[in-house]
Image (cartoon, rainbow, N blue to C red):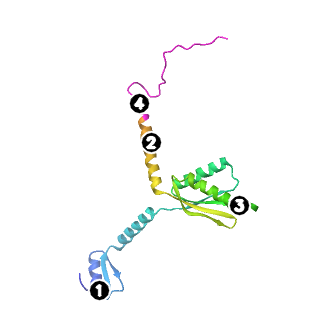
Amino acid sequence: MGIRPLPEALAIARQQDLDLVEVADKANPPVCRIMDYGKYKYEAAQRAKESRKKASNISVKEMKYRPKIGTGDFDTKTRKVEQFLGEGHKVKVTIMFRGREVQHPELGRKILDHVAETVSHVGLVEVYPKQDGRNMVMVLGPDKKAQAAAQKKRSEEASEAAADTTPSLDGPADTPHISAQPVESSAD
């Protein structure tokens, strides 16, 4: 529209039932736009909300182990670590040393290496094991390629399972198969 005096620009905006909004205040003369300011604010809020929705919230979960952990407990905790990684979380694996156990950090390193090896199909080591006072810490992060492969495998298995449950033309799928062989009974 060109350069207009402020009262004239306001009059033009009011004629169209719109607002006169200053978009560049540092320019000389200031740059203004005639628009519906309420609609503009609403659309900006919707864009911001959409961008927050797309941002992933990666939280850090923690799993604590001890140097003398049993195999059952190790398997249970490691399964949980695997589940966290599958959900897209980072996992901080901590080995807690007590008393003189601190003098044998190789035991903690061995456990951390075993955990990393066990969950290598869904995660990878982001921060390698390091001693932190009485604790040894390692951070595992989800492996996007491995997760995509696991998701593809799960969807294939689901489609195969759905195909197996479809009834056949021979009869209902839940009818047990009856054999024509006679059954002998033993009389005691």
Q: Residues under labels 1 and 4: Cα distance?
A: 78 Å
Give the CA separation, mark 1 to mark 3.
81 Å
The picture places residue 184, in percent across and down from the top left corner, at 57, 13
How many other residues sit within 10 Å of disc 4, few (<14), some (14-19) or many (≥20)? few
Q: Which residue is mark 1?
A: 7
The residue furthest right is: 99
> Any magenta on residue 135?
no
- Rendered image quadrant of residue 127: bottom right
Residue 115, image x, y percentages: 59, 54
Choose between 10 and 124: the one closer to the eye. Answer: 124
Mark 3 or mark 4: name the one nearer the start of the chain. 3
Q: Amino acid at mark 4?
A: Pro
Mark 3 or mark 4, whichever is nearer to me:
3
Rendered view: 130 above or below 15: above
Instruction: Report, in whole angstroms, how far the alpha carbon at label 3 lies from the one at label 4.
Output: 61 Å
Q: Which residue is mark 4?
A: 167
For residue 39, which numbered disc appears in the image? none
**Of the two numbered discs 4 and 2 in the rendering, the one whose residue sits closer to the viewer:** 2
Name the residue that disc number 2 marks. Answer: 158
Q: Earlier in the sequence, mark 1 or mark 3?
A: 1
Q: Which residues fall within the magenta stretch? A: 164-188
For label 2, the SS is helix
Q: Earlier in the sequence, mark 2 or mark 3?
A: 3
The three-letter code of the residue at mark 2 reads: Ala
Please report contact status of discs 1 and 3: CB closer than 8 Å, yes or no.
Answer: no
